[in-house]
Amino acid sequence: MRFNTMGAKVSIIIPCYNQGHFLDELLDSIRDCNSDLYELIIVNDGSTDQFTNDKLRELKAKGYQVIFQENKGLSGARNTGIQAATGEYILPLDSDNKVRPAYLTRAIEVMDAAPRVAVVYGNAEYFGEQTGTWKTGAYNMQKLMIANFIDACAVIRRSVFDKVGLYDTNMKLGWEDWDMWLRISFAGYEFRYVDEVLFDYRVLNTSMSKTLYNNYAKPNSIENYLHEKYATRMGHQYITAHWVKRFRKSPVLFIAKLILMTYFPRYYNNKLLKKNKVRNGL
């Protein structure tokens, strides 16, 4: 494990709140990475769990860079790590996930060659209570303004934070990574998608992302906050108004088209859309 931060290319930032029982598995994955490429910064975000605090004190005694702070939430913990980082690039890594060695090498190759690329991200392999591959797909700003599809575990150029700011500490309910991707997008930087599995994403029924959808109040609150924050750029109300207008004009045709697009995409694309027998989109 890399303890000397001098010359590190990537700073791996790990916020940890009461998840010390996952750290050994995560650290094992980092040990497989080229130790010349990274520094590791763990931020104990005011953990109340005794095991987690003992584990982090043990790691600090072994030479790991562990920062202890009062609880500031995920955004605040990431910000603390970024401010302490010396690497040219930042990789936020949740304490219950794992990273693959290719993430560092692929991101460094891309970013060293293309200074306008601010974010490099890839696919993930699910583990825990779900299996399979999460293919995030190529970057698209319109898609991003509708909903987030890029996980927080992406390599970010350190200098970009100086331009767009750190994570929004007001977003304590989640999706602070979505806000960051929007800010970086609106600032005109480029994203680069690598179509490979670059990290492992643990699925837990008790995870922050899972509990976010337990009721509509949380996602609605976050979306309303972002829509107000970026009022001139995004908002579901514009898309919804467009769909409602089209539906009111011809409800039967609207539903028929939706069914064809959903269940018969080949027929819809090849027989209807390519021959201009239907209008593109809903």
Image (cartoon, grey):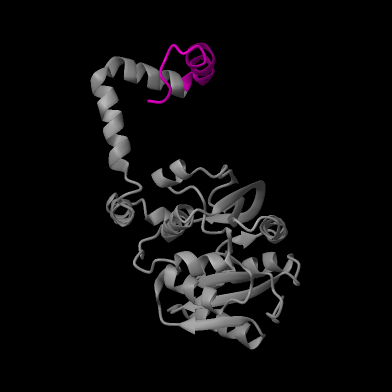
* Residue 33 point in image, percent of width and height: 73, 65
Quarter of the image where the N terminus is located? bottom right
Q: Work out whether residue 135 can be spotted.
A: yes
Answer above or below: position of 20 versus 118.
below
Q: Residue furthest left?
A: 248
**Residue 134, horizontal then vertical, whole percent:** 57, 45
Which residue: 29% across, 35% down? Answer: 240
Seen at 42% across and 61% down, the residue is 176
Count the numbered circles shown.
Answer: 0
Magenta residues?
263-282
Query: Is residue 137 magenta-colored?
Result: no
In the image, taking residue 131 as reference, residue 6 lies left or right, namely right
Where residue 251 sits, quadrant-wise, is: top left
For the C terminus, the quadrant is top left
Q: Nearer the viewer, residue 230 or 102?
A: 230
Residue sitting nearer the eye, 223 or 83: 83
Residue 137 at x, y = what percent?
A: 57, 42
Tell me if I can see residue 124 in this picture: no
Q: Nearer the viewer, residue 97 or 187?
A: 187
> In this view of the protein, which residue sits in the foreground, 222 or 206?
222
Furthest residue in direction bottom, as rendered: 61
Residue at (57%, 42%) from the top-left corner? 138
Q: Is residue 273 above or below residue 55?
A: above
Instruction: Residue 75: give x, y in percent of width and height.
Output: 43, 68
Direction from residue 204 to residue 154 in the image, left or right:
right
